Image: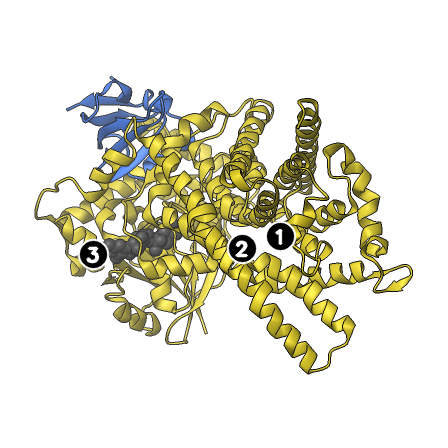
């Protein structure tokens, strides 16, 4: 399953980031979002706007199309 | 005197610490990457310099403001590193710390946000951490200054030596390659070879360029590919960058497991609760627009206008009278009197009147930045920006551009994608900066008394709309093959400190006052001189002055736009120096003692041509300072020229359409 399949408030573990745009991938890495880390989808912006994610206490926003390339396993 | 370099992740309180340690106050912002320039301060004990570097997550740069840090390490001389760490985000921050430790220079760590981490129930064993990393660590709260004294004292003591002890084992394959690469480097290098090698393997482009001056490119490339191949086959990993990151991550986990104690589970924070409202699916955009509207009304209508009126009353009333009396007292000549009254007071005073409004606007922008809301704006607006081919981060330079285009253009540096950054830089000047406000104020006061706020708002919106349309067009031409990306960290909300807020408002606004004392002063004197003299000598009627001649040359160009007078031409010409100079020029030209400037203007403009003129002023060429900064930021004369040309072209076409169209439908 991918990150966009999660409902608001769901928690999941990232399993694969390799399909994500390389720039985004590296930024995510900088912010500590790598494989094996927990994420929560907090909410999404209207009209298919970006997602609002939380991962160990920090908030990050990325676009829906990038999020749909992140494989996760729901907890 | 030696130099100490301050490194840290974005939003860790670097700027706050800088201010505490140096006393000289710097600009404090809260959205990722406000500190984009190298800033140097003198430490409070006057012994060393502290250099503030942009906030970075890693030494491997992704955006151009991040290049600064690596370039600094490669090229500059300094004696010590001060690394500031956010205690509430320890793991992430330690990645940078490790890279800095690998650089093997004397280093001290300031463990910041201790108050926040305590609140979250995180306890850190500092002594143990200091042992594990092999450097001194000082717990601090940069916001209040707690612990900063101890830190400052230790910065002075020259006891800290180079750290050789810190080393992560990257595994035999990579370690061998690091060794191999190091051997290729000249032995007299004063930068750690191990660090250079690791950074190169991690994919640091700046380090790669640096290494190319010693090692042929193909040789470098070969080592890299060979290493990656070996690692991918043995470790089943997608890239070298990732491999190195993972190794560090493991090491950090090992460290934190020994020093971190979580004493309680966290409840929803203030930030969470506020975000529930502010970034709410339905309310997010309306809230942002409302905030913009309130800012606008405060600046222009509710608070700014009455204040400007009072100031205007003072300058044109008592102040002018006092100076007249003074001039009379010292027996000044008619020439000098005219210079001071008709030139300087009219020119500089006409601009100074707007100081209150400009400061209100800067205050509001500082508030948005310092509170952490700016990053939310980027997120909320991303969808719209994506539609025109940009990303939400481009919205931040534009908002800053409402204050002044110069810092706006510089703020575009945080955008990772080079083409998107280029576009944002080119479009930011279309944002109506505060220097254009005086022009609108003068004209709406004369022609649109009833609809003042509405007319001015329409100009601001016009600037945004034009920028968005151009973004759409340019991105489909320029960015055809590039995917637009967006990722932003949303820092926790923090209640801005009043002191910080006032200082950062002042820092932004003082440039405006300085301009009034320099460019505008000089411009006013020059313009007055040109208006006072003519081919037939001094004290000529205005219409026979040099100024009238110069303005008259370009005036016909503007006839189709409705303002083909030499006065408008002269104003626009001088307005390139700084947009406020348009007002100085007009104030000097239309200076009619005992008569009202605005009433007099009514004989020169119709409401339609006045509107056309305002639109033209909004859009035509960025001011000199902005043009210079665009050239510097993009490092290209071609793009600078393009920016000037395109804005003039659009201004001309639009004003033409407005004026001719307006006439057709009977205005
Ligand atoms: N509670 C708390 N807040 C802090 C502390 N240090 C800084 N802050 C706040 O954190 C926010 C960001 O601080 P800055 O000093 O702007 O951080 P910075 O690292 O310079 O940020 P950038 O320049 O944007 O990278 C400000 O609102 C500060 O008031 C601290 O120790 N405790």
Chain displayed in yellow: B
| Horizontal arrangement in the rendering, residue B176 relative to residue B461 (left or right) | left
Q: Image quadrant for the C terminus of chain B?
A: top right
Q: Colour of chain A?
A: blue
Q: Position of residue B466 (x, y in %)?
A: 57, 30
As drawn, is B440 to the left or to the right of B4?
right
Tags 1 and 2 in contact by the CB under 8 Å rule? yes
CA gap between label 1 and label 3 equals: 46 Å
Disc 3 under 8 Å from ligand 1? The reply is yes
Q: Are marks 3 and 2 in contact (CB under 8 Å)?
A: no
Q: Which mark is residue B580?
A: 1
Q: Which residue is mark 2?
A: B354
Q: Which circle marks residue B114 in the picture?
A: 3
Which chain is home to disc 2? B
Q: Nearer the viewer, residue B63 or B502?
A: B502
Tell which of B135 and B61 is nearer to you: B61
Q: Is residue B194 visible?
A: no
């Amino acid at each position: 399953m991918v990150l966009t399949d999660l409902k608001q408030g769901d928690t999941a573990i990232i399993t694969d980031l390799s399909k994500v745009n390389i720039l985004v991938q590296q930024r995510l890495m900088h912010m500590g979002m790598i494989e094996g880390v927990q994420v929560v989808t907090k909410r999404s912006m209207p009209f298919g706007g970006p997602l609002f994610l939380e991962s160990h206490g920090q908030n990050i926003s990325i676009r829906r199309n990038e999020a749909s390339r992140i494989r996760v396993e729901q907890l | 005197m030696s130099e100490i370099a301050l490194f840290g992740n974005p939003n860790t309180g670097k700027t706050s610490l800088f201010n505490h340690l140096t006393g000289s106050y710097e600009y404090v912002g809260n959205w990722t990457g406000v500190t984009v320039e190298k800033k140097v301060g003198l430490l409070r004990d006057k012994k060393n310099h502290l250099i503030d570097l942009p906030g970075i997550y890693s030494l491997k740069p992704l955006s151009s403001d991040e290049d600064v840090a690596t370039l600094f390490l490669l090229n500059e001389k300094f004696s010590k590193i001060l690394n500031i760490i956010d205690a509430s985000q320890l793991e992430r921050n330690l990645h940078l710390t490790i890279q800095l430790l690998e650089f093997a220079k004397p280093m001290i760590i300031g463990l910041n946000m201790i108050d926040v981490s305590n609140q979250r129930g995180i306890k850190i064993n500092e002594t143990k951490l200091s042992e594990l990393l092999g450097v001194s660590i000082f717990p601090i709260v940069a916001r209040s200054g707690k612990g900063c004294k101890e830190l400052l004292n230790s910065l002075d003591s020259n006891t800290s030596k180079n750290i050789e002890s810190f080393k992560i084992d990257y595994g035999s394959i990579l370690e061998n390659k690091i060794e191999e690469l190091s051997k290729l480097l000249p032995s007299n290098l004063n930068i750690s070879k191990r660090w250079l090698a690791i950074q190169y393997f991690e994919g640091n482009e700046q380090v790669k360029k640096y290494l190319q001056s010693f090692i042929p490119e193909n040789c470098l490339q070969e080592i890299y590919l060979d290493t990656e191949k070996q690692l991918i086959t043995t470790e089943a990993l997608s890239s070298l960058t990732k491999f190195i990151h993972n190794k560090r991550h493991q090491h950090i986990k090992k460290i934190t497991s020994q020093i971190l104690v979580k004493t309680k589970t966290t409840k929803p924070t203030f930030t969470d609760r506020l975000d529930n409202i502010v970034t709410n699916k339905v309310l997010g955009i309306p809230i942002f627009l409302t905030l913009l509207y309130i800012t606008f009304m405060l600046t222009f209508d509710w608070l700014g206008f009455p204040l400007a009126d009072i100031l205007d009353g003072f300058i044109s009333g008592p102040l002018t009278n006092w100076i007249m009396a003074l001039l009379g007292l010292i027996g000044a000549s008619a020439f000098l009197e005219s210079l001071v009254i008709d030139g300087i007071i009219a020119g500089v005073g006409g601009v100074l009147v707007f100081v209150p409004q400009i400061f209100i606007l800067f205050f509001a922008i500082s508030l948005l930045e310092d509170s952490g809301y700016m990053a939310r704006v980027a997120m909320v607006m991303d969808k719209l920006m994506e539609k025109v081919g940009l990303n939400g981060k481009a919205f931040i330079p534009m908002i800053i551009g409402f204050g002044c285009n110069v810092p706006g253009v510089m703020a575009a540096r945080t955008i990772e994608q080079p083409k998107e950054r280029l576009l944002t830089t080119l479009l930011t000047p279309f944002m109506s900066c505060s220097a254009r406000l005086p022009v609108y104020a003068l004209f709406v006061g004369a022609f649109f008394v009833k609809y003042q706020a509405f007319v001015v708002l329409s100009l601001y919106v016009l600037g945004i709309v034009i920028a968005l349309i151009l973004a759409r067009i340019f991105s489909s031409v320029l960015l055809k093959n590039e995917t637009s990306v967006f990722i932003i960290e949303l820092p926790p909300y923090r209640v801005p400190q009043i002191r910080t807020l006032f200082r950062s408002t002042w820092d932004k606004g003082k440039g405006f006052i300085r301009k009034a004392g320099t460019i505008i002063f000089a411009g006013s004197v020059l313009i007055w001189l040109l208006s006072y003299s003519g081919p037939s000598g001094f004290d000529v009627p205005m219409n026979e002055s040099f100024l009238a001649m110069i303005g008259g040359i370009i005036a016909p160009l503007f006839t189709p736009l409705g303002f083909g007078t030499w006065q408008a031409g002269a104003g626009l010409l001088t307005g390139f120096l700084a947009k406020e100079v348009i007002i100085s020029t007009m104030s000097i030209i239309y200076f009619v003692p005992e008569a009202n400037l605005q009433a007099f203007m009514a004989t020169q403009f119709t409401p339609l041509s006045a509107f056309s003129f305002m639109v033209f002023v909004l859009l035509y060429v960025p001011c000199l300072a902005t043009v210079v900064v665009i050239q510097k930021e993009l490092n290209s004369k071609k793009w600078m020229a393009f920016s000037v040309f395109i804005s003039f072209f659009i201004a001309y076409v639009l004003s033409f359409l407005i004026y001719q169209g307006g006439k057709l439908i009977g205005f």
